[in-house]
Image (cartoon, rainbow, N blue to C red):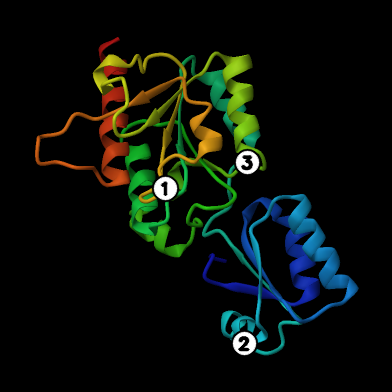
Amino acid sequence: MTQDTPIYGIHPVEELLAARMRDIEHVYFDKDKKNQPLFNLLRICRRERLSYNLVPEAKLNALAGTMKHQGVVAFCSARPYNDVEDLNEILKKKPAPLFVVAASIEDPGNLGAIIRSCVCLGADALLLERKNTVPLNATVARASAGMAEHLCIVKPRNLEGLIGDYVNNNGFSVAGAAMGGETAPAGYDFRKPTILIMGGEHRGIPPYLQKLCGTCISIPMAPLGQSLNASVAAGVLMYECMRQRLRA
């Protein structure tokens, strides 16, 4: 099952919510159809902070490829997400993990390239937002060149709270990649437990994550350079992390 494969109908979506809630990328509801089963599904989406939209029936017909969707269509990730417990297992094995956060990344090619760099350059896990970031769909999986299967990828219910917990209880420092940041990559100590936040192509790091950053890292560029692609910037910073740790 991939994100491009629709799951439709009230009972199948109920089963999906019960069995694979963390793998659900998006749920679409018929904005004009109202009944108790659909309301119950919508309430679960709101409670669990799942991404959803209310759309016209014609949109649902197109998404499902059929008119027999009963007013609801859901999509799942290209592979199951890891659980937060998998992050905790990494903490037990490594004294100084590197967790990368991809926030507001809209281009599936960029997210796939970030995943590929994470695996090649030794990042321990990738954390994704529930909303505002492209889903882990088949396009992302292809762009990762198969590396998505080899990385711990987590989409936590409360990303902000999880990062705060790691800072307060596990000694992590949070660094954000941003133009005009006060720290050069070589000036940041990547040898300590680090959460590296990469912002999106258009919106950068969202404010709710920006406030968690203790440091902003800016990559030096030639005079004619204006900015780097998000995945290229991520690769540069992850390489610097690997370089420092190999020399430690």
Q: Residues within 10 Å of mark 1 (few under 14, many from 20)?
A: few
Give the residue at mark 1.
203
Q: Residue at x 58, y 79 (%)?
A: 63
Compared with residue 48, is residue 62 higher up or lower down, i.e. above or below?
A: below
Q: What is the three-letter code of the residue carrying label 3?
A: Pro
The quadrant the N terminus occupies is bottom right
Q: CA distance from mark 1 to mark 2?
A: 31 Å
Per the image, label 1 sits on a secondary structure element best described as loop
Give the mark, 1 or 2, whose residue is nearer the N terminus.
Answer: 2
Residue 27 position, x and y percent, is 66, 66
Q: Residues within 10 Å of mark 2 (few under 14, many from 20)?
A: few
Q: Residues within 10 Å of mark 3 (few under 14, many from 20)?
A: some
Q: Nearer the viewer, residue 240 or 29?
A: 29
Res 243 seen here: no
Q: Which label sits on residue 58?
A: 2
Compared with residue 224, is residue 40 higher up or lower down, i.e. above or below?
A: below
Q: Nearer the viewer, residue 78 or 199?
A: 199
Give the residue at mark 3.
156
Q: Does residue 74 appear left or right of residue 131 in this picture?
A: right
Give the mark, 3 or 1, whose residue is nearer the N terminus.
Answer: 3
**Is the C-beta separation of discs 1 and 2 under 8 Å?**
no
Q: CA distance from mark 3 to mark 1?
A: 21 Å
Per the image, label 2 sits on a secondary structure element best described as helix
Q: Does residue 40 appear left or right of residue 67 in this picture?
A: right
Which marked residue is nearer to the observer: mark 3 or mark 1?
1
Q: What is the three-letter code of the residue carrying label 1?
A: Arg
Residue 220 position, x and y percent, is 19, 29
Q: Residue at x 81, y 59 (%)?
A: 43
The quadrant the C terminus occupies is top left
